[in-house]
Amino acid sequence: AQKVTQAQTEISVVEKEDVTLDCVYETRDTTYYLFWYKQPPSGELVFLIRRNSFDEQNEISGRYSWNFQKSTSSFNFTITASQVVDSAVYFCALSDSDRGSTLGRLYFGRGTQLTVWP
Amino acid sequence: ETGVTQTPRHLVMGMTNKKSLKCEQHLGHNAMYWYKQSAKKPLELMFVYNFKEQTENNSVPSRFSPECPNSSHLFLHLHTLQPEDSALYLCASSQDGRTEAFFGQGTRLTVV
């Protein structure tokens, strides 16, 4: 069964600190997709990144970086030099889509509430 | 303008009322989803529609009735809800399950 675990329920940091959000997943599929979403107080989930299971290359986008390690089934997200606007709930998700005509679905972790203090 | 639009943004309804949530996507996607987000619970997938056909129903009570008249519109009809159904209902769309899903801003539903 697919499962996503975000062990950190809440994290508080002071502006300009670096912060890493952990994500551990479980799946028996060899092909799968991993995602990170941000949910600000407005409620909308904002897509941040997608990774497929065959691409373990780490990615950097501005202050955001992601570390995908299949050996530990982890897909961690780091924010460098955090800012107050980064305050939000961050969700890691797994999609098992690749089963012919059957659409996949997103399995979400419980989310990590990040608060960045000025 | 967001690619996925949900209306209304907030809804308060009594347990005997009938109401509908609306979702519209302008992204040309083939798949649409309803998710439920309750306090202190993970996001729960409720329904999946692919090319207007329902492909998944995750044991959702019959008091929630989805409708997908075309690939751009998705409704969630509500009737005789319970207070525990109060939650944020999120609509999403994706080209297919391999690409990212785009979410609307959600409807905050309160059942009194």
Image: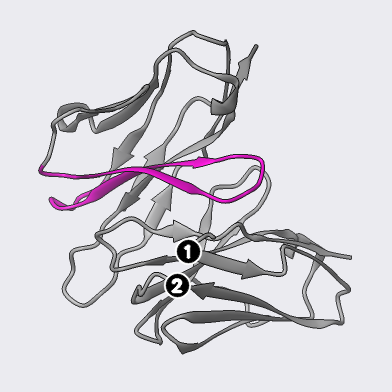
- Residue B26: which numbered mark, if any? 2
Residue B6, compared with residue B66, is above or below; it is: above
Q: Is residue B49 left or right of residue A55?
A: right
Query: Label 1 lies in what chain?
Result: B
Q: Which residue does the image show at 59% across and 81% down from the upper left?
A: B75
- Expressed as whole percent of the image width and height from the top left, the position of residue A58 reads 19, 28
Q: Which residue is mark 1?
A: B3
Same chain assignment for discs 2 and 1: yes
- Quarter the C terminus of chain B occupies: bottom right
Separation (CA) of disc 2 from disc 1: 5 Å
Per the image, label 1 sits on a secondary structure element best described as loop
Q: Amino acid at mark 1?
A: Gly
Q: Amino acid at mark 2?
A: His
Numbered label tally = 2
- Expressed as whole percent of the image width and height from the top left, the position of residue B69 reads 49, 91
Q: Is residue A115 left or right of residue A77?
A: right
Along the polypeptide, which appears first: circle 2 or circle 1?
Answer: 1
Query: Label 2 lies in what chain?
Result: B
Residue reaching furthest to the left:
A54
Residue A107, compared with residue A7, is above or below; it is: below
Label 1: how many Cα within 10 Å (few below 14, some 14–19, many 20+): some
Per the image, label 2 sits on a secondary structure element best described as loop
Residue A103, compared with residue A66, is above or below; it is: below
Residue A14: in magenta span: no
- Expressed as whole percent of the image width and height from the top left, the position of residue A45 reads 52, 49
Does residue B90 appear in the picture of this structure? yes
Mark 2–mark 1 CB contact (< 8 Å): yes
Q: Quadrant of the rendered structure where residue B9 is? A: bottom right
In magenta, the rendered stretch is A27-54
